[in-house]
Structures are given as structure tokens and as C-alpha cells.
Amino acid sequence: MKLSVASNLKNDLIEKIAEFKAVEEIFGKLPFDFTGGGRGILSTFQVNKKMFAEHVKLAQEKNIRFNYLLNGTAMDNQAFTRKGHKEIRKFLDWLTELKIDAITVSIPYLLQIIKTNYPHFKIYVSSIANVDSIEGAKKWLELGANKITLNDRSLNRNFKLLKAIRKNTMCQLELIANNNCLYQCPLSHHHYGLLSSASQKKAKLKGYLIDYCTLMCRYLRVTDPTEFIKAGWIRPEDTKTYEELGIDSLKLVGREMETEHLVTIVKAYSEQHYDGNLLDLFSYNTHFKENTISKLSLLMLGLKYYFKPFSINFFKLKKLRDALIQKTDIQINNKDLKDFLIHFKSHDCNETPCEDCDYCRNIAEKFVKLDTNKRKEYLQKYQAIIKELHSGEFFKA
């Protein structure tokens, strides 16, 4: 199984993952560009174009391909203007100069611009495009996609449908292995729209993001820890199952992570084995993590993109940030889930309400470890901020 690995744009990452033969590419993007993408400014490492170009060149010297993410969900209609189209073309010219291997998109129009004018690029479809059916995959293939990252929020354990998509689709298929989004997440569409706007060069509120969706996600998980089990992650030990289905590669996310964390994840999926807390392989406890950048840099970025005294209460914003970076001390021993996947090989979650099955709930009750007092503390903190956001109190001076 080949691996596509998130890049934090730090050169030491390339040096450390080059030894793993399963790694065929890394993916990433600038903190800001025309389309934006799936990360906000405070959860990515800050690099300029020169630093980015050096990173890409180093990867290529190590025979690791680079996949650039142009996977924003909307461009404020600017792509349909003379100036906007010119900017897109100028940016694609720059990616051509860098000899970028592939570009990931979630907008069909952008795919067709690239296909028409830059046929040397391989084009991948982002999981943000929500491809989760045979016909959906075939339509992207007809548009010219070379690889599709399927919707991990609904498909990762639907083996019957994965097998059918593989049978009827000739392009490469990929699954995200270590995402921990809610199963059938009602927030994801809105969340990717927020993140796209927060990383778009021309956005009116450039860089500004109140990450309500991540806050709600944490609240829902702590309210019902079954959500940790229902999420569509793939254990390193279960990689073989997906290989047998014909999945070509696994995507390992976590562009906001430090190098050592990413290397741990790559090692686990390369060796198809991990001893420890399953959540170590996810980004659950790294969102807005303080060691992403220095405290001084974090403060300066916060002032630059969030200091809007006529729009928001800056002190309430700090309370939100503190809630998001707090480590939640949740433990799920990966070894305990040895036979977890067997159930799904003969069970279709789309045909049965969760309350009529309770498989994941029983697993969660046995293996998700969270101190009762800590759980109450987290719930109170999340509830207080959510209430202020809903009432409008959060924005008052």
C-alpha cells in the first residue's frame, strides 16, 4: 500500500520519511493562495514562496512526489472574472516552474482549467468533494481525474460499496486513514467552507476564523464517546484489508503537526503496526497546538488576523482558543481493537440505525477511557462557549 503524507513544510520531515519505501508523495500548500483549502492560518506552519520551493525541490531529490492542494470549496466567484482567471493561471504557471507532480481539487471548473491548459499535471479529487458513490466517481473520472480520494466520513467501512466503486472506476482510489471526523458529519460541508475562506488570499476577512465546527465536534464527542469509535479511521494493522479491496493508497493527514508526530504516523502505517493510544495517530489533540509555532509568533498572528475590536470580543476569542488547544487525555488502546473491523465486513451501516446495532457503543464503553471529572470539565467549558456563540454574547464588547 502506497502512502500519501501530509507535509508540515519543514525540511526535516522529508529527510526522516524518505527511508520509508511506502511513501510515494507528500502533499501541502501555502498558508494563503487563491482557492484556500482545508486548514486555517493558525493551524499551519508559516512559509513563504521561496521556502516552499526549496521544500518541493528537496522532496523531488529524495524521489518523493509533491501534490499541491488547490482544494478550497469556493472562490467568491472571482474565478469567473478576467482578473481572477489571470491570477489562477499565474499561480499554475508558478507550480509548473516548481515541477509540481499533481494538484488536488474539489471544484470541477478548476479541474477543467488545469486539464485544458496544464495537461502535464496529474489531477486528484479531494475528499472535500464528497465522492461516495459509483456514479459520483465515474463523473469525476470523465472530467479527467487521475485519482479520487473518497469520502472517509461515510465510506471507509462500507466494504460492499468500496468494492463496487473499485470495480467500476479505472482511476486510482485513495482513502484517508487517520482522519477522525464524525461519521456522516453534518458540520463538514460548512467547516470546509469556513477553512477555505480563512486561507484565501482575496477573502474579505483574510485569515479570520471562528472554528465553531471543531468546537462542536469536540463537544459532540465528549457528550457521546461512541463518536470516537464511529469515525472512519483505519488502523495500521487493517491496511491489508483495503489493499485486497483494490485501494491504491492511503492518505495520512496532519499538516499542522510537528515532524516527530508525523514520522510516528508514517512509521505506524508503513510497518502496519502500532502499540499505544490510537488517538496518537490522529490530529484530535493537535488542532491549534501551542508548539506549532512560538508563543510570540502565535500572538503576532492572532493580532494580525483576529484583532477586530468592532467585530468580536478578543478575550472571548482567547477562551475559545484555550478550549481548542487543551489536550483531552482520552485513551483508546490500539491493541484492544484487534478484531474491530470484522463486524463491518458483513454489516452495512447505511441500512441500520446506530441505536438498533450498538456495536460501536459497546466498543466505546469497553475501550474509550476518559476520566469522569475531566469529562464534566470539558463539557462545561464547551457548552459555555457554544451558548455564547448562539446567543451572540461571544461578540459583545
Image (tube, rainbow, N blue to C red):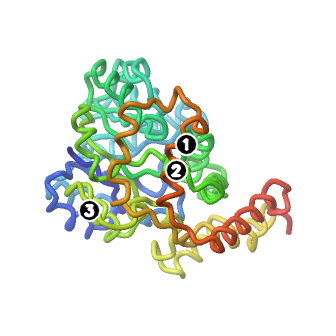
Image location of residue 355, percent across then percent down: 61, 38
> As rendered, which of 343 and 118 lies closer to the eye?
343
* Tag 3 secondary structure: helix
Please give the label number shown on residue 262: none
Residue 373, above or below 265: below
Q: Which amino acid does the dot numbered 3 rest on?
A: Glu
Q: Residues within 10 Å of mark 3 (few under 14, many from 20)?
A: some
Task: Write the residue at 24% across / 43% down.
Answer: 101
Q: Which residue is denoted by mark 2 in the rendering? A: 362
Please give the label number shown on residue 358: 1
Q: Which amino acid does the dot numbered 1 rest on?
A: Asp
Q: Residue furthest bottom?
A: 296
- Gap between marks 2 and 3 measured at Cα: 49 Å
Residue 11, above or below 70: below
Number of the front mark, 2 or 3 = 2
Residue 313, by quadrant, is bottom right
Q: Is residue 158 visible?
A: yes
Q: Quadrant of the N terminus?
A: top left
Image location of residue 215, percent across then percent down: 64, 58
